[in-house]
Amino acid sequence: MLRSPGYMTRALNAIRSVVAHDLLFSMATASSSRKLKEYREGNSKLLLALGVDPASAMASHLLSLLNTPWQKGQLAHVCMGHACVCGGFLTSSARYECVLQISKMLQQVIFGSLPPVPIMARWTKVAATTAWFALGCIIHRFLPKVARFEFLYCLVFVVSGVVLVRKPCPKPN
């Protein structure tokens, strides 16, 4: 399915819509910095369990942008103010800029390299594919949301197309 013609284009277009719809953007309080460090440590452990180095630049940026517990279903960013990686205070539309950055980062992390297709005769060698799907599902259940959005968009498009094609026949005089 991921390698079918046109699927990745539709999925990549769905990413920004999913992030824009789902993102909770809030400002940090004085007591939230300790919690954010705990959340980052927990999310780093999830990345390590999936074989991703949390010290890499991309993973570190992702951990800074999505800085709430990833087990929760909703994407969330707690902005730390002027020093935040989202750059929210540098623009007049902080949430929109954060949506753009998170969309770009998730596109690079999840869809940057597709999982290898496991060979049917070697069903025991599916670790890389399983890790890719797990990563997409662990980060705020992002991959199922993109798939659901893309499926519903295509369903509406097909239904709309059918409705447009099926015009009532004119009545004979």
Image (cartoon, helix red, strand yellow):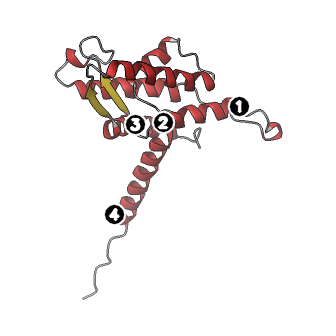
Lateral position of residue 67 relative to residue 111, left or right: left
Lateral position of residue 13 relative to residue 46, left or right: left
Whether residue 170 is situated above or below residue 86 in the rendered picture:
below
Cα–Cα gap, marks 3 and 2: 24 Å
Residue type, numbered disc 2: Gln
The residue labelled by disc 1 is 127
Tags 2 and 1 touching, CB below 8 Å: no
Residue type, numbered disc 1: Ala
Whether residue 108 is situated above or below residue 149 in the rendered picture:
above
Q: Position of residue 64 (x, y in %)?
A: 40, 19
Q: Earlier in the sequence, mark 3 or mark 1?
A: 3
The residue labelled by disc 4 is 164
Lateral position of residue 128 relative to residue 56, left or right: right
| Relative depth, front residue between 57 and 71 | 71
**Residue at 52% from the left image edge and 34% from the top image edge:** 138
Q: Earlier in the sequence, mark 4 or mark 3?
A: 3
Q: Nearer the viewer, mark 4 or mark 1?
A: 1
| Relative depth, front residue between 77 and 9 | 77
Q: Nearer the viewer, mark 3 or mark 2?
A: 2
Q: Number of labelled discs?
A: 4
The residue labelled by disc 2 is 71
Number of the label disc, if any, that sits on residue 52: none
Q: Nearer the viewer, mark 2 or mark 1?
A: 2
Which secondary structure lies at badge 4? helix
Cα–Cα gap, marks 4 and 3: 24 Å
Q: Earlier in the sequence, mark 3 or mark 2?
A: 3
**Residue at 34% from the left image edge and 27% from the top image edge:** 77
Lateral position of residue 111 relative to residue 32, left or right: right
**Residue at 23% from the left image edge and 24% from the top image edge:** 94
The residue labelled by disc 3 is 13
